[in-house]
Amino acid sequence: MKGDVLLRAKALRKHFTIGGGFLGGGKVVQAVDRIDLEIREGETLSIVGESGCGKSTLARLLLRLIEPTDGEVLLEGRDLTKFGRSEMRRARRDLQMVFQDPFASLNPRATIRDILTEPLRLHGIGTAAERRSRVDDLLRMVGLSPDHARRYPHEFSGGQRQRIGIARALSLNPRLIVADEPVSALDVSVQAQVINLLKDLQEELGLAYLVIAHDLTVVRHISDTVAVMYLGRIVEIAPAEELYRAPRHPYTQALLSAIPVADPAHVASEVRLEGDLPSPVTPPSGCHFHTRCPFATPECAADVPEARDLGGGHRVLCRRLDEIPAFEMPQDTAVAGPETAYARRLAALEAATARRQAQRREGDATAPAS
């Protein structure tokens, strides 16, 4: 168990109205619907799910970058949604964000020193000399050199720019960092470097992370707890080891069964879902997943199920849980960490490249002389 609860969401909702114009009559998008979760000090909570399920909206609600329709966001028991401007400004020091696209999130006309100094200046932290020293320390902390401070974002690689984004998030000594797809825009080999950097910083500084991600291999490696979202609701949340070993919700089983196993002899046992993801504008009644669930009954469409507590922090939003057969993840998928997975991906790529080069050489050798 990690430390005390740092951030808690209670019955959090966010509904957007689209269309309708000035006279109203627009449609309501239920982006986030009745979310309850908590993040502890030093913990990594990851949120996974299909595109459009509300992951990024939830992250922005927890940081109060957008206002909730209903519910509470409690920072150590204090409701952020009730904070005034000055209180929220102070709270910003504890809550920072790393964005998906490191290039788009950095001002292309500012030097790295200006980018990293700006948060310190806005919060009135330190003298000019102290800020300069702090910037140098931040760059060293993320594996860069203080000499890089005079350069501009376009002069760095994608991985280096993401390190700069991480340095900016660290500048105010936050307690929680929200990382929205922090490695999805990076090459596979660079992804591993950034992930390891995040883990090292967490151990050194005691940070808590909320990670939004699609790569389930990455999520398995970095997470203490994993929450699975579907159409604005968390359908399953559990410790990472437990979720990857024996997922209980049919949607979670379908997601995890799609993880490729690096074994040519392995016969895939993928759980296939029927139909397409419904629109959040007109979500299904009752359990949102019942239109695609192979175990659904008419009662699943009638009422929203209550989350069932399986103990040990494992909760599942499903009324048919006892009728769903156990699903054991393949040993290779359940146990393998990202070092193994990334190494296999790179080895496969190198092998394929070597084969193509050998084929070209053979073709050149057998080609008739001109």
Image: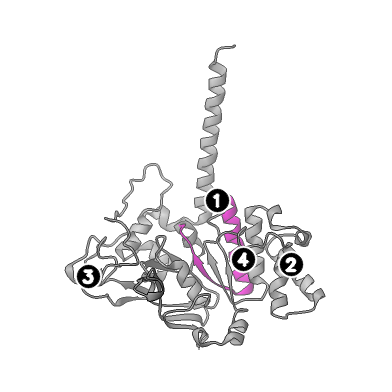
How many other residues sit within 10 Å of disc 3, few (<14), some (14-19) or many (≥20)? many
Mark 3 to mark 2: distance in Å? 55 Å
Task: Give the image location of residue 200, x and y in percent.
Answer: 62, 65
Q: Mark 1 sits on what residue?
A: 188
Query: Foreground: 70 or 91?
Result: 70
The amino acid type of the residue labelled 2 equals Asp
Looking at the image, residue 75 lies above or below residue 288: below
- Could you tell me which secondary element the residue under label 1 belongs to? helix
Q: Earlier in the sequence, mark 3 or mark 2?
A: 2
Q: Which marked residue is nearer to the observer: mark 1 or mark 4?
A: 1
> How are the colours assigned in the image?
one colour
Looking at the image, residue 310 lies above or below residue 152: below
Q: Which residues are magenta?
A: 186-215
Q: Residue at image x 69%, y 54%?
A: 154
Please name the predominant secondary structure of the magenta segment in the image.
helix
Mark 1 to mark 4: distance in Å? 19 Å
Q: Which marked residue is nearer to the observer: mark 1 or mark 2?
A: 2
Mark 4 to mark 3: distance in Å? 44 Å
Mark 4 to mark 2: distance in Å? 26 Å
Q: Mark 3 sits on what residue?
A: 300
Task: Decide if residue 101 is on the left or right side of residue 319.
Answer: right
